[in-house]
Amino acid sequence: MMGNRQRILPLGVQAPATLEGYYPCPNAAALHAVLKLVAEPQGLCLYLYGPGGVGKSHLLLGAASALAGWTPYMDCGDVPQLFNRIKDLEGFSSLVAAPLLCLDNIEVWAGQRDKETFLFDLYNERMSNGRPMLLAGRAAPRFLDWALPDWASRASACLQVALRLPDDTERMAILQEMAQRRGLQIGVEAAHYLLRHHARDPRTLDGLLTILDAGSWEHQREVTIPFIRLCLGAEKP
């Protein structure tokens, strides 16, 4: 039986990505760079890169929500619908005027001259007006197959910060912090089991803890290895 402790009801509503909710280990440098960009939104282009699951999208969404006014976040993977909506003059002007512009999965547009020209013009207008940009991709700009040399040069001139996936020790620390923020008690053995038997990127771990938190609340049970197996489908009720 669980002890008497205050718990936040797990209502199944996913909280929006915020910079405060980002788990910095092992990418504290990236979080610090984004926080500085938000605090001092001057004419700077910050480029985050790393594999999937390191939290690039979380940082961009958090930055977009941290500033007042319309601060657009756009996933360049949402093409062609996205590009068709913003390439007109009115759409371009609104992106130039935004206090911060966050473009995710920028590598999707590499090799497409029309989209790179759009990025090149957008970059020049925003930098000349002292308005920052926050870009993210899976690889550093110099490793992407850009079609437009001028844009390749601009992208490579951005302040670049690499992100990486956590190692086993760091994953354990992240998992424990995630559980602690929820008020969820999970022992060392149960945490090790979860990391050994399930995907271990922070986003997936957060989703698994959401399931376990809801199950723990519903059944009034501590998170043990048998309970993890039960909640995540390894055992029948």
Image (cartoon, rainbow, N blue to C red):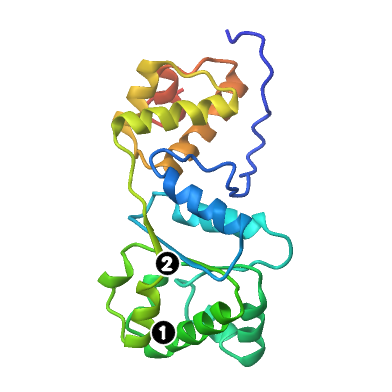
For the point 49% across and 48% down, which residue is it? Answer: 31
Q: Secondary structure at mark 1?
A: helix
Q: Is residue 42 left or right of residue 143?
A: right
The residue pinned by badge 1 equals: 116
Which residue occupies the extreme right position in the image?
A: 69
For the point 46% across and 40% down, which residue is it? Answer: 24
Q: Position of residue 32 (x, y in %)?
A: 50, 48
The image quadrant where one finds the N terminus is top right
For the point 35% across and 38% down, which residue is it? Answer: 200
Spatial CA distance of label 2 from label 1 is 13 Å
Name the front one of labels 2 and 1. Answer: 1
- Mark 1 packing: few (<14 Cα in 10 Å), some, or many (20+)? many
The foreground one among 220 and 49 is 49
Q: Position of residue 101 (x, y in %)?
A: 58, 69
For the point 41% across and 69% down, which residue is it? Answer: 158
The residue pinned by badge 2 equals: 105
Q: Position of residue 128 (x, y in %)?
A: 57, 81
Residue 196 occupies which quadrant of the picture?
Answer: top left
The foreground one among 110 and 132 is 132
Q: Is residue 19 left or right of residue 144?
A: right
Q: Secondary structure at mark 2?
A: loop
**In this rendering, does residue 186 appear at all?**
yes
The foreground one among 116 and 228 is 116
The foreground one among 202 and 50 is 50
Q: Position of residue 155 (x, y in %)?
A: 39, 75
* Residue type at the position of mark 1: Glu
Q: Establish if 102 lies above or below 217.
A: below
Residue 157 occupies which quadrant of the picture?
Answer: bottom left
* Residue type at the position of mark 2: Asn
- Mark 2 packing: few (<14 Cα in 10 Å), some, or many (20+)? many
Q: Establish if 188 lies above or below 79.
A: above
